[in-house]
Image (tube, grey):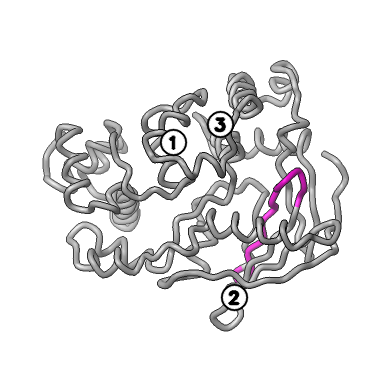
Amino acid sequence: MNKTTSLKNKTSLSLEYSEPFSFEKTFYAPSRFKSGLEHFDGKNYFLSFRYAKESFGLKFYMKSKKLCLDVYSSRKISDSKLKDISDEISFRFFLKRDFSKLHKDFSKDKFLKNALERSKGKHIVSIYNLYENLIISTFLQNATIQRTISMCDNMLNTYGSKIEFDGCTLKCLWDAENFNPTEDDLRKLKVGYRAKNILRIHNHFKELSVTERELRKLEVLKLVKELLKIYGVGKQTVFYLVLGQFHVTDYLKHIPLWERKILSYYLFKKELVDEKELVDWFNNRYKTWSGYAVSLIMEDVFHQHKLKPLPWMKKIMRED
């Protein structure tokens, strides 16, 4: 890894957001993989942010009811770049999406009320860009947490960098344009078969003719078509990306078998409901929130199971 770069130039701004809004629930997720690219100290959220070939350090915090952002850089930032960064952050953290109608319409819904109560103020977040998200997701494939951490550290120590700002030191992902390892180079870092997958994903983005910002403007079915061109992205990964990365809350075309088993029992006390029937049920009941509703209900089921093991979940998850 290159030496640590100290970012001493600070520019402060405030970000607009829609209520309900919770700083901690939006910016901090205890279950999120600890990549070393972010840090939450209980009050401030720090993030390494690569944008337009530069590395920035971002510090988020609340001051009264104002969401504040300090942008740390190696040199003075132009007003236009600062606006670009602000717009990008606003999108990634879905700050301006109005979730109040979701809570108003479904706060008493039998299956959503508990999840909505716990997640009130939480906005849908994509802290990484699409390339970073897919690369980091590759480390998570079929591996223990310790193995994933080891692979991620090896890659970032070899090809990434470090930044220091406001007393916080974070890792940064590599500059995609200057990332040119061979498969053998990556295998030496003990990432296994993922070496080939990482290069396939990397090469796809290297040859991509449209930017992520342009992808965001596509009608959802065209977006899905583009995402399916990426190696390793299938029907379920598309769902996660369309919801989590592009914040489309009403996209739901597929529910994988293991989730369908859980939802079938939780919603209908049946062993397995036909996929189309289940998809139609969510689309008809939750409409513009159908995809997000699946995510919320699944999260709620696992929350209940963690608090007090559910016998039927133990059977589905083969925990006996």
Q: Is residue 245 above or below residue 82?
A: above
Q: Which residue is mark 1?
A: 223
Separation of marks 3 and 2 at Cα, in angstroms: 33 Å
Q: Is residue 38 above or below residue 62?
A: above
Please tell me which residue is depicted at 83% across the width and 59% down the height of the picture.
Answer: 7
Quarter of the rendering occupied by the C terminus: top left
Type of amino acid under label 2: Met
User: Which picture quadrant has residue 8?
Assistant: bottom right
Rendering coords of residue 215 (x, y %): 51, 39
Cβ atoms at labels 3 and 2 below 8 Å apart: no
Please tell me which residue is depicted at 20% across the width and 33% down the height of the picture.
Answer: 275
Separation of marks 1 and 3 at Cα, in angstroms: 21 Å
Q: Which residue is mark 3?
A: 138
Q: Which residue is mark 2?
A: 62
Q: Give left or right: position of 228 versus 33.
A: left
Helix, strand or loop status at disc 1? helix
Looking at the rendering, the stretch of residues picked out in magenta corresponds to 42-55
Type of amino acid under label 3: Thr
Please tell me which residue is depicted at 48% across the width and 44% down the height of the picture.
Answer: 217
Q: Give left or right: position of 173 versus 97.
A: right
Q: Nearer the viewer, mark 1 or mark 3?
A: 1
Crowding around mark 2 (Cα neighbors within 10 Å: few <14, some 14 to 19, many 20+) is some
Rendering coords of residue 249 (x, y %): 35, 50
Please tell me which residue is depicted at 47% across the width and 30% down the height of the picture.
Answer: 226
User: Which picture quadrant has residue 75?
Assistant: bottom right
Q: Nearer the viewer, mark 3 or mark 2?
A: 2
Q: Is residue 80 above or below residue 275?
A: below
Rendering coords of residue 274 (x, y %): 15, 32
Residue 48 within the magenta-colored segment of the rendering: yes
Along the polypeptide, which appears first: circle 3 or circle 2? Answer: 2
Crowding around mark 3 (Cα neighbors within 10 Å: few <14, some 14 to 19, many 20+) is many
